[in-house]
Image (cartoon, coloured by chain):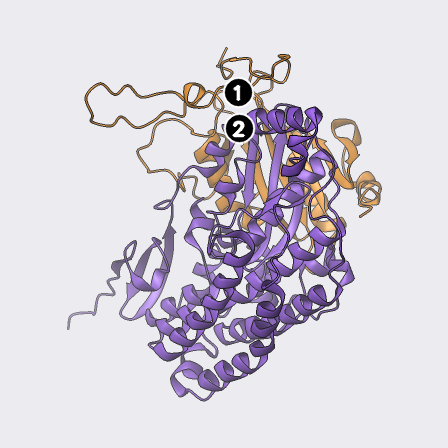
Amino acid sequence: MTELTRETLTLNMGPQHPSTHGVLRLVLELDGEIVRACTPVMGYLHTGIEKEMETRTYWQNVTLVDRIEYVASYMEEMAFYLSVEALMGAEVPPRARGIRVLMCELNRIASHLLYLGTAALDLNISSVFMYCFADRERFLDLSEMVSGQRMMPGYFRAGGVVADLPDEFVPAARAFLDEIPGRVDEYARLLDDNLIWCERTRGVAVLSREDAIALGATGPVLRASGVPHDIRKLLPYGGYEEFEFDVPVLTEGDAYARYRVRLEEMRQSRRIALQALDRLPDGPVLTNDRKIALPPRGELARSMEAVIHQFKLVSEGYHPPPGDSYVATESARGEKGYYVVSDGSNRPVRVHVRAPSFYNLQALPAMVVGRPLADVVVAVASIDIILGDVDR
Amino acid sequence: MGQASILDRLRPHVPWGLTTPKEERGRAILLATPGVLLEVLQAARQHLALDALVDLTCWDRLPASPRFEVVYLLGQAAGSDRLTVKVLVDGDPPRLPTAAGVYPGAAWPEREVYDMFGVVFEGHPDLRRILMPDDWEGHPLRRDFPLTEEAVEFKGHTPKVPSQIIPFFSPHSPSGSGGEPPPTAP
C-alpha cells in the first residue's frame, strides 16, 4: 500500500491581485486549502521617499509626505509638521490647531470609509463599496474647498495651515457630519444582516493580544485585540487633550472586531470634528514668526522686511537647530511618527517614517497560518494596509 | 510629558557607566554601546514594562565617526511611557546583535535597516533585503549613495546629480547658497 505524500504547493498571491489593495506579494505554502506559511514580499511600490526628502527643503517635503499614506494625507502632514515644529519650537495659533484636528478627523472618517468599502468589496458586497465611496466623495469635496486638492492637499505649514477655511466650508462640513451616524448605522445593518459577511469575518484572521503587542501592531488592529491604546489619549498631541471622545476596544481580535472598532471610530471622529467646529476660535491660522512662515501677501507691498523674509523663505527655507525629534500621532491605521534629524541646514539629514501599515502587516502571517486560503483575503482587508505606507 | 523618571527607574538595572542618559524636549534618551544593547533592551522590557518596540531606525552620520546611529524607540501597550535607545556603531559592515529575541516585532525593521544602511544584525532569523530588489547593490540611505536620475534615451541628455538639480544650500554661507557638494566617503 502506498503512503499518501503530503506535498505543499507554493502559491504566489500578487503582486498584481485585486485583494492585496496595491502591489503586495504573498508567497503562500499551501497544504490543500490550508495555509502553512505566509511570507509577505514588499517593495514593489518603494519610491525612495525617505532618500528624496534628504535632498529637499523642509517645506518642499510636504509634497512627498502626502504621498506616503495617500488616503490619510492630512494626518500624514500633521505627523510631519509636529515633528518639525518640535525641532524648531514653533508655536501654532489656536485656530490653526482646531482646523488641523478638524481636518484630521474628517480624513479619518474618509479613510475608514475606504476600508469599509474595499473590505466589503473583497467579499463581493459591492453595494456597500458604492455607498462608502459616494460618502467619501463628500470628504474629497470638503478637502477641495480648504486646500484646492481632493487628495494630496499640501495644506499644513510649519506653524499653522496655509489658508483659513472658506465661508462655504462650515455648513458643508456640518451637513456631512450630520449624516454620518445614519450612514454608519446603515452600513452596519447592511453588513451585519449579511450572512456571508458575518460568516467570513467572525473568528477569522484572529490576532491574539500578545501577538499584536509583540509584533508592533497599532491602531484599530491593536484595539480590536483588546488593548486600549490610542495615542490621542495616551500622548495627546496637537490639542487633542481638549476634546472628549471614547476609544472603542474589543477583545475578539478577529476581522469582525476590527470592522466594529472602525465603525465606532467613525462615530467618535464625528464627535471630535463637531467639537472642533463648535469651538473654533477666531484669529490667525499661521504663526507670526517670519523666520518660519511666509508674510501675508499684502505686507509685501509695504514692508521691505517682509520682502526679505519672503525671499529667504522661498529661496532657502528655514533652518531647524541641530538635533532630532519624534512626535507620535494616531493616524487612521495606527501610530504614525516622523523621526527627523537636522544638522542645522535647511534640509533634513534623515527622515524616517514610522509606518503603521508596515508594522501591522508584520502581523499577517500570525493571522493566516493554519487557516484556509480564502481567509487571507479577509485578513489583508481587515489590516487595511496602504502600500504607499508599507513601501514608502 | 515628563518621561525622565523612566531613566531613574532604569538606573539599577543597566550598567550606568556604559550608557549616557539625557532628556531632550520631554523625550527620555539613553545612549548605549553595542556591547550592552541587549542588556538595556531586556531590562527595559522586564523592569519597566516597555513591552512594545514602536520603531527601529538608523541614520548615517557621515563624515562623523562612528558612522551609524541606530535608534530604538520603546513603548508600552496601553501606556504612555517611552524610551529612546541610541547606539553608535561603526565597522565594515557595522554589526549589532539582533533585538528580535527581545522584541519579535524588530524582525522587519531590522531587515529595513540592513537593506538601507547595511547594518548587519547578528542572530537575526531572516536577514534579507525587504524593500529593495534582492539583487540590488549598495545601501541606498547611506549618505554617500548617490541619488541620480535614471538615464533617459533622448539625444543630448546627460543625467544630473541632485546637487545640480537643486542647488545645495550651506547653513554657514552668508547668502545661504553655498553650492557646497554633499558629503562623500573619506
Where is residue B142 drawn, in percent x and y? 48, 26
Looking at the rendered structure, the secondary structure element under dot 1 is loop
Q: Is residue A314 left or right of residue B152?
A: right
Nearest the eye: B88 or A348: A348
Q: Residue at x 75, y 36 (%)?
A: A89
Q: Quadrant of residue B148?
A: top left
Q: Identify the residue shown where x is 46% and y is 33%.
A: A52
Q: Colour of chain B?
A: orange
Q: Is residue A92 above or below residue B78?
A: above
Chain name for mark 2: B
The residue wearing badge 1 is: B91
- Of all chains, the one bearing label 1 is B
| Residue occupied by mark 2 | B95
**Given contact means CB atoms under 8 Å apart, are the residues at marks 2 and 1 in contact?**
yes
**Disc 1: CA contacts within 10 A as few (<14), some (14-19) or many (>=20):** few
Q: Residue furthest front?
A: A302
**Residue A323 seen by the camera:** yes
Classify mark 2: residues with Cα within 10 Å, few (<14), some (14-19) or many (20+). Answer: some
Q: CA distance from mark 2 to mark 1?
A: 7 Å
Q: If the image is split into quadrants, where does the N terminus of chain A sit?
A: bottom left
Q: Secondary structure at mark 2?
A: strand
Residue at (40% x, 25% y) in the render: B147
x then y, percent, for residue A281: 76, 58
Task: Identify which amino acid the numbered label 2 is placed on.
Answer: Arg
* Percent x, y of residue B13: 78, 41
- Residues behind callouts 2 and 1 on a single chain: yes
Chain colored purple: A
